[in-house]
Image (cartoon, rainbow, N blue to C red):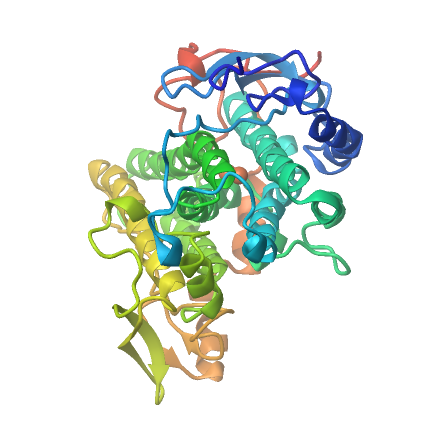
């Protein structure tokens, strides 16, 4: 009988979907594998392909114990296909098919829509690996380097997860899409990744931490809503991906947290009370809090664009069809069809930002984005607790959702982080107060010196409170000279 909890390592591609018996799909994936490895060596972490990295690998999809830790050379990582166990009698839980049994195969009428959803999700996974590929060289510690590589190999696995669905359920066009996922490149002029934030640079470690806090959290929201899908294999795939995603956001939240911790400690030790005395704070070799705020402004606003336009018929169609639900759909107390419901949306009306009730179905992007913002705000408050505890008078905050937007209602106007509309000329004058300037970037870059001694950390970041897998403080998370 097929064991759907423990992972089968007997095939080249570890899996819990019975690939041994599914020869056609196994062969298709084996055919895709060499191209993937070429992509990894080409576009994955630069310079550390031979290093031994202390990584977790999934051995089961049991939430109570799904991973084992051990040293692995990244190109030898066992990227597998893992789906959460099938739920007996699961149903489509929303939209016009509500109450029907969940689909185990692609419903013909929704084939194109489903493929598009899977390809868009799939495209983000290798993109972030490409964006982060140069960071190993400036890692502030072996602990952080290991976390970076863990996130990278798991984004690689998420690509495998989507490619499995394409190969298994979409035949020839699925195979073509799977090949395209290896062909596009983040930031490439001719064939960029599909979404804007995944074509931006991740130039330094503070950007990496902000990215994993804000952008991986968008990933979480998208996966949460795809986990609601009536197409059961997609739902099961996304449910397991969410288990891994939690660590990515942990890396982001604690990375920023340790950065501001170190800044506050250094300020206190030097007797600096004014967090805005940037020159003095920077002289201590730490990142001043106003600059942390600017980085936050940038990554939050870039990530909001990933939710798409506030009003979207696509998202209404995905919902109606039962393909993509809302965040925690089954816990929401309503009819799950939304035929007559309304939802408040921020819009630009006669030059003013106002709240307007819109049909809830077309406002689903907005709703997911609101849920996302709330989740972000809670994380920012945890950062503020760190600052407060150190006795520094400064608060980080999320900028207004209309700030620095390239997609949706506010794309053509300039708006400050407080939500005030300003003229383009005023914006040009103020821009560097709100977003990282070239000088801010240069300063941060000047701090990005690798620290490779076990248990040691760069000047600008505090040590973590606990090690990965409960390892001691001086554990050698990456053996570089392997
Ligand atoms: Fe991912
Ligand atoms: Fe992630």
- Using the rendered view, name the quadrant where residue 21 is placed: top right
Q: Is residue 433 left or right of residue 1?
A: left
The residue at the point 40 percent across, 39 percent down is 256
Q: Is residue 150 left or right of residue 274?
A: right
Residue plotted at (45% across, 48% down): 222
- Please state the horizontal and vertical placement of residue 418, each as a whole percent of the image: 31, 68
Viewport quadrant of the C terminus:
top right
Residue 461 falls in image quadrant: top left
Q: Is residue 441 above or below residue 384?
A: below
Residue 280 pos. (x, y %): 40, 47
Q: Is residue 420 visible?
A: no
- Front residue of this view, candidates 173 and 404: 173
Q: Position of residue 199 (x, y in %)?
A: 63, 54
Question: In terms of depth relative to the viewer, which is nearer, 167 or 92?
Answer: 92
Please name the residue shown 40% across and 12% down the image: 470
Left or right: 48 as drawn, with respect to 5: right
Residue 87 horizontal/vertical position (percent): 38, 30
Q: With respect to residue 16, does 306 lie above or below? A: below
């Amino acid at each position: 009988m097929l064991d759907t909890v423990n992972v089968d390592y007997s095939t080249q591609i570890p899996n819990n979907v019975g690939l041994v018996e599914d020869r056609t799909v196994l062969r298709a994936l084996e055919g895709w594998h060499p191209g993937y490895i070429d992509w990894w060596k080409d576009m994955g972490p630069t310079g550390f392909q031979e290093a031994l990295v202390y990584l977790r690998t999934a051995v089961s999809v049991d939430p109570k114990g799904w991973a084992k830790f051990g040293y692995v050379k990244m190109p030898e990582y066992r990227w597998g296909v893992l789906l959460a166990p099938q739920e007996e009698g699961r149903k489509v839980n929303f939209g016009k098919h509500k109450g029907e049994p969940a689909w185990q195969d692609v419903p013909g009428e929704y084939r194109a829509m489903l493929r598009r959803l899977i390809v868009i999700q799939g495209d983000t996974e290798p993109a972030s690996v490409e964006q982060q590929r140069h960071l190993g060289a400036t890692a502030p510690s072996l602990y952080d380097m290991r976390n970076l590589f863990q996130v990278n190999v798991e984004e690689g696995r998420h690509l495998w997860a989507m490619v499995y669905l394409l190969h298994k359920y979409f035949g020839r066009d699925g195979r073509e899409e799977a090949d395209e996922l290896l062909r596009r490149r983040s930031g490439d002029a001719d064939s960029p990744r599909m979404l804007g934030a995944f074509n931006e640079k991740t130039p330094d470690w503070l950007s990496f931490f902000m990215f994993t806090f804000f952008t991986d959290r968008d990933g979480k929201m998208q996966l949460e809503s795809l986990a609601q899908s009536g197409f059961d294999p997609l739902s099961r795939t996304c449910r397991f991906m969410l288990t891994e995603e939690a660590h990515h956001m942990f890396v982001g939240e604690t990375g920023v947290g340790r950065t501001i911790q170190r800044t506050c400690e250094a300020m206190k030790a030097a007797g600096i009370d004014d967090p805005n005395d940037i020159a003095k704070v920077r002289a201590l070799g730490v990142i001043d809090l106003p600059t942390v705020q600017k980085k936050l402004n940038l990554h939050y606003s870039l990530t909001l664009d990933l939710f798409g336009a506030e009003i979207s018929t696509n998202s209404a169609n995905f919902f109606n069809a039962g393909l993509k639900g809302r965040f925690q759909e089954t816990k929401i107390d309503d009819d799950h069809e939304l035929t007559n419901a309304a939802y408040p949306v921020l819009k630009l009306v006669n030059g003013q930002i106002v709240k307007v009730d819109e049909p809830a179905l077309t406002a689903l992007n907005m709703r997911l984005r609101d849920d996302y913002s709330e989740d972000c705000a809670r994380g920012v408050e945890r950062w503020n607790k760190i600052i407060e505890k150190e006795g520094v008078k400064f608060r980080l905050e999320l900028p207004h959702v209309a700030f620095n937007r390239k997609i949706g209602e506010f794309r053509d106007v300039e708006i400050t982080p407080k939500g005030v509309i300003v003229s383009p000329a005023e914006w040009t004058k103020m821009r560097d107060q709100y977003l990282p300037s070239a000088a801010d970037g240069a300063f941060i870059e000047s701090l990005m010196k690798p620290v490779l001694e076990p248990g040691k950390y760069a000047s600008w970041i505090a040590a973590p409170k606990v090690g990965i897998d409960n390892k001691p403080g001086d554990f050698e998370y990456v053996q570089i000279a392997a």
